[in-house]
Amino acid sequence: MKQWKCTVCGYIHTGSIPPEKCPVCGADQSQFVLLPDEPAEAEQQRDSSADDNMRGDARPKPSDRDPSGLIPERFKGISLKLTKLHGHPIAVHIPNGVLPISVLFVFLSLLFGSEALATAAKVNIIMVALTMPVVIVTGLIDWINTFKGRMTEIFRIKMICAGVVTLLSIVLAIWWIVAPDLYAQGLFNNFFFFLLHLIDLAAGAIAGWYGGKLVFRAK
């Protein structure tokens, strides 16, 4: 059987023709290239697919744009170092871990009227708001260096979700600062406030799920 390699994420597909869409990154059929028939060479390319993307050896289509200009020349060395050291996966663990705790504390503080839990929820959502710019910047750097800056459905969804998490976290943090005693009004009177937290959490979960597909992509 023929083997096809996705030039965006390095996924290897076995079949007579490439899939209509990459099951990992969502790239269309035109982004697949046929691998050589030699087993040894094909195996070597399969094992080094992730490194190939970073080095630019994924053999993109001639029509693909060059994303290198998206990063200023003086920052390219730093950007490559951040990608090599997994800057984005490290940064994204902060909001991914803190946001669920913040939502839980919000629910409990509104349910029981707890000032301590309300303070903890406020501090956590402020932390999410402060770290999201770092997550977005390192994510864009990885998108350019590792995935050639190509826009697929999965990357579009991740970017939208990151924007939602950032915007909602900032709004909720300001809301807590402006009305620090809203916990005393109960869950029913603050249902919309709590609903925004749930939407924030859902957006973060969706982005994390798609990010996991890219990190643990099949080789």
Image (tube, helix red, strand yellow):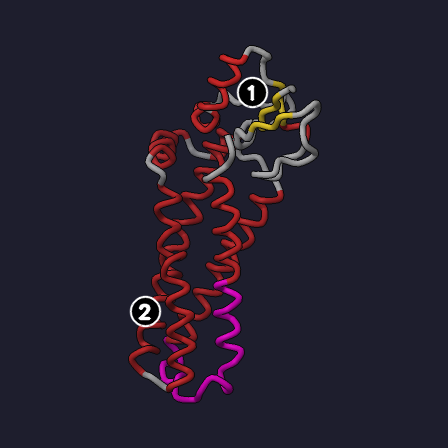
Q: Which residue is mark 2?
A: 123
Q: Residue at x 49, y 54 (%)?
A: 162
Q: Magenta includes 179?
A: yes
Q: Where residue 87 sits: x, y (%)?
A: 35, 41
Asked whether, in this view, residue 92 is left or right of residue 165, the answer is left
Q: Residue at x 38, y 60 (%)?
A: 128
Q: Where residue 94 sits: x, y (%)?
A: 35, 55
Q: Residue at x 34, y 62 (%)?
A: 127
Taking depth in this image into account, of 30 and 81 the one nearest to the observer is 30
Q: Main secondary structure of the magenta part?
A: helix
Q: Secondary structure at mark 1?
A: loop
Q: Where residue 201 sits: x, y (%)?
A: 48, 63
Q: From which residue to which does the magenta span run?
A: 177-201
Picture layout, residue 71 above or below residue 130: above
Asked whether, in this view, residue 1 is left or right of residue 97, the answer is right
Q: Secondary structure at mark 2?
A: helix
